[in-house]
Image: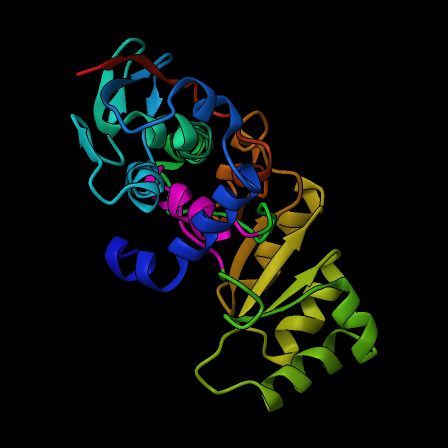
């Protein structure tokens, strides 16, 4: 993701919405103790080991409140940091620092938590051909940030949204009247450059999907024995993705299957935040 282009097209409006959620009319606490502009400085401090993601979003929060504020980092996105590391400093109007602190930290803690969790799982796949994918199970209005964090942590992005690719799930199959019908209808409707992926919950569905010409077959919530049977039957005629409640605790059982992809909604919906604080604010 190109930070500058993305910021211009998408991120600014989302960050502004987050700020407006937190400051509906005024920051009463800050205005009470800081009635006029006063230059100050604070340190961004890491309170646990992890992988950083979202530093540019952290900075942008403050820039939208005060264009003259200065944020300097000692690390970059994707860097490993340790407990007590000083990530950077922020210098500028104390009112902007106080008013933007929570929103900026919410983004940085959330994104760094996702990157850290993703990295811990991606490390388990390093010696395999399998790629770790995220899903659309993201926080509303935060997908662009959360999927960026997955990539920063060493994972790969599945489709960004419903306009980004064809993935026929159980209800699409039901609406179409069956696996073969769903695949055939998708191949007829979608541009030829689009791959057709379909979710299968049984070996019988897998056979029907491959025979209908599906490009990618998702083995969803199937037992290991069923997955092995399905993989053997596919025999290279389609790419294979495993999915269904995959977490750091259980992913190792899928690695030996040798599939092309393993997708995990947990990367974005269950990653704990990374503990980061803005401390030592003082007048300069």
The residue at the point 54 percent across, 37 percent down is 22
**Front-most of residues 252 and 237:** 252
User: Is 173 on the left-hand or right-hand side of 246?
Assistant: right
User: Is 263 on the left-hand or right-hand side of 144?
Assistant: right
Residues drawn in magenta? 141-158
Question: Up-down: is 144 above or below 21?
Answer: below
Q: Is residue 132 visible?
A: no
The location of residue 156, given as percent across then percent down, is 40, 50
Question: Up-down: is 169 above or below 148?
Answer: below
The location of residue 84, given as percent across then percent down, is 29, 8
The residue at the point 68 percent across, 51 percent down is 220
Q: Is residue 152 magenta?
A: yes
The residue at the point 37 percent across, 41 percent down is 128
User: Is 172 on the left-hand or right-hand side of 273?
Assistant: right
**Front-most of residues 45 and 19:** 19
How is colour applied across the structure in the image?
rainbow
The C terminus: image quadrant: top left
Q: Is residue 194 visible?
A: yes
The location of residue 152, given as percent across then percent down, is 33, 41
Q: Is residue 184 magenta?
A: no
The location of residue 20, given as percent across then percent down, is 52, 45
The N terminus: image quadrant: bottom left
The residue at the point 82 percent across, 75 percent down is 175
């Amino acid at each position: 993701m190109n930070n500058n282009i993305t910021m211009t097209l998408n991120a600014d409006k989302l960050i502004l919405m987050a700020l407006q959620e937190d400051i509906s009319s005024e920051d009463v606490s800050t205005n009470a103790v800081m009635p006029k502009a006063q230059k100050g400085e604070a340190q961004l401090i890491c309170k646990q080991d992890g992988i950083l993601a979202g530093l540019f979003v952290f900075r942008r929060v403050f820039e939208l409140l005060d264009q003259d504020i200065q944020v300097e980092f000692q690390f970059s996105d994707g860097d490993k940091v340790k407990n007590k590391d000083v990530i950077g400093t922020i210098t500028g109007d104390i009112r902007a620092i106080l008013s933007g602190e929570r929103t900026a930290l919410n983004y940085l803690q959330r994104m760094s938590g996702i990157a850290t969790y993703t990295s811990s799982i991606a490390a388990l796949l390093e010696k395999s051909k399998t790629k770790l994918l995220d899903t659309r199970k993201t926080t509303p209005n935060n997908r662009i940030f959360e999927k960026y964090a997955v990539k920063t942590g060493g994972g790969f992005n599945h489709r960004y949204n419903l306009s980004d690719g064809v993935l026929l799930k159980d209800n699409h199959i039901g609406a179409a009247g069956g696996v073969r019908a769903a695949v055939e209808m998708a191949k007829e409707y979608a541009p030829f450059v689009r791959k057709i992926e379909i979710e299968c919950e049984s070996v019988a569905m897998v056979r029907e999907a491959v025979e209908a010409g599906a490009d990618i077959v998702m083995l969803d919530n199937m037992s290991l024995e069923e997955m092995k049977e399905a993989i053997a039957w596919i025999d290279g005629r389609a790419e294979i993705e495993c999915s269904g409640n995959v977490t750091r605790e259980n992913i190792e059982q899928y690695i030996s299957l040798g599939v092309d992809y393993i997708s995990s909604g947990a990367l974005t919906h269950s990653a704990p935040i990374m503990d980061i604080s803005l401390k030592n604010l003082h007048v300069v």
